[in-house]
Image (cartoon, grey):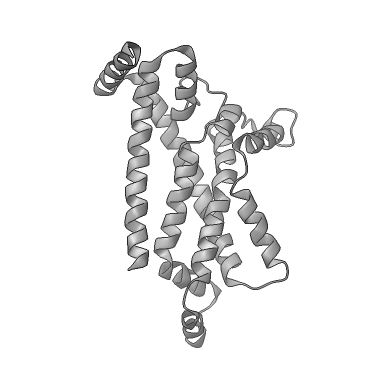
Amino acid sequence: MDFICEGFKQAFALLWACDEETLNILSVTLQLTVISMTGIVLIGMPLGFLLGYCTFPGKRTVRTIVDTLLALPTVVIGLVVYAFISRRGPLGNWELLFTIEGMAIGQIILGTPIVIAYTATAIESLDNRLRLTLQTLGANGRRLALTSLWEARYMVLVAALTAFGRIIGEVGSAMMLGGNIKWHTRTITTAISLETGKGDFALGIALGVILILISLLLNISLNFLRRRTQN
């Protein structure tokens, strides 16, 4: 137990001193998260609205596929994206492998189905009178979509936060696509995995504390939004 206690002491010392390596890992994680969440929201929300609002042949099949993608293993995503962006892949000329942008592709694929599924459910749960009222007032497609999403805003925010929680703790695809390169593509989760394997518990615990704080803030936000949707 002594090495665990010593690890915690060194971890808080690193956090208090604003260790350069720790801050770099946090910075890479934040950059990756911002890029990924931007793509997830911009792709997931419109597709989720269409899936929840429109009726078309094969809708149930599409919904089943989206729900299946919610449980897609991260290493499978990493493998598929790696095959596309590696030098021998069709996107090899873009040189995305072992970059933050390449890692973001994997996380976007991971988080987008969550936003699609939650947004579709939120749109389907809206009062049918809203659609009729908007159509009566002559709202066009864009106005109709924006108003519907605004009415379901709390559930849509829950969708975004749930996707955020899914990608912030992701290891598999981030390790494969980023290579866990020090000062470049090392994130909180990949660094914890590496440092723990090396026996450096101080940095691993320090990063774990940061990840726990992020998870705590995420859960507080989700609980707040759930109460707002229930009221």
- Give the image quarter of residue 97: top right
Question: Does 115 sit left or right of 80 as displayed?
Answer: left
**Which residue is found at the position 49% from the left and 19% from the top?**
194
**Which residue is found at the position 34% from the left and 16% from the top?**
4
**Which residue is found at the position 47% from the left and 55% from the top?**
159
**Which residue is found at the position 53% from the left and 31% from the top?**
171
Nearest to the observer: residue 45 or residue 94? 45
Question: Is residue 23 visible to the viewer in this orientation of the structure?
Answer: no
Residue 134 to residue 24: above or below: below
What quarter of the picture does the N terminus occupy? top left
Residue 4 to residue 77: above or below: above
Residue furthest out toward the bottom: 136
Question: Does 222 sit left or right of 46 as displayed?
Answer: left
Question: Is residue 164 visible to the viewer in this orientation of the structure?
Answer: yes
What quarter of the picture does the C terminus occupy? bottom left
Instruction: Count numbered badges in the picture.
Output: 0
- Image spot of residue 127 (x, y percent): 47, 78
- Image spot of residue 122 (x, y percent): 49, 66
- Image spot of residue 6 (x, y percent): 30, 13
- Image spot of residue 227 (x, y percent): 33, 61
Residue furthest out toward the left: 16
Residue 3 to residue 189: above or below: above
